[in-house]
Image: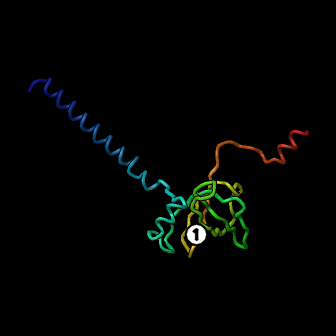
Amino acid sequence: MSPNRVLVRYRLLAVAAAGVAAVLVGMLLFGNLNRNLVYFLQPDEALAQRVDYPEGRRFQLGGLVVADSVVPTPDGVRFVVSSTTGDGGARIPVEFSGAPTQLFGSGIGVVLEGAWRGPAFVSDTMKVKHDENYRPPADEAAAGATS
């Protein structure tokens, strides 16, 4: 066998081994990615797929807190989430047990984990969606301007 043929075989073997290694690394990195992604349903999707999520089956619901719908309760807070900021979007009443996060309020985006109980979505986990822009509270901004 000529030395060139041996060299070609080793190159083919190296290319094949590199290809197998690349596929394995890709499977490790991206194969488990789907299990780590967090999906949530918008209120209109949750209402449309209500039969797929019977009472007690947990899922994540995301939406905007409807203005003037936040009512504190002894064990948490009750509010309504909507698909849109205006009227006409699907609305779901939410009963959240626990202390809401500091950024929680009307008009803010939330992702809740819980289950249906009757017409309401009962949740025990809340994530607040916010942008990257920090604005100090109005009281602190006014005090800083007068100093």
Place residue 106 in its image quadrant: bottom right
Q: Residue at x 53, y 62 (%)?
A: 60
The residue singled out by tag 1 in the image is: 121
Residue positioned most to the right: 147
Quarter of the figure that contains the C terminus: top right
Q: Position of residue 144 (x, y in %)?
A: 86, 41
Q: Position of residue 12 (x, y in %)?
A: 20, 32
Residue 127 visible? The answer is: no
Q: Residue at x 88, y 44 (%)?
A: 143
Q: Residue at x 58, y 69 (%)?
A: 121
| Mark 1 secondary-structure assignment | strand
Vertical arrangement, residue 112 with respect to residue 18, above or below: below
Of 56 and 52, nearer the camera is 52
Task: Specify whether 10 is left or right of 100.
Answer: left
Quarter of the figure that contains the N terminus: top left
Task: Specify whether 72 is left or right of 1.
Answer: right
Q: Residue at x 55, y 61 (%)?
A: 43
Vertical arrangement, residue 91 with respect to residue 129, above or below: below
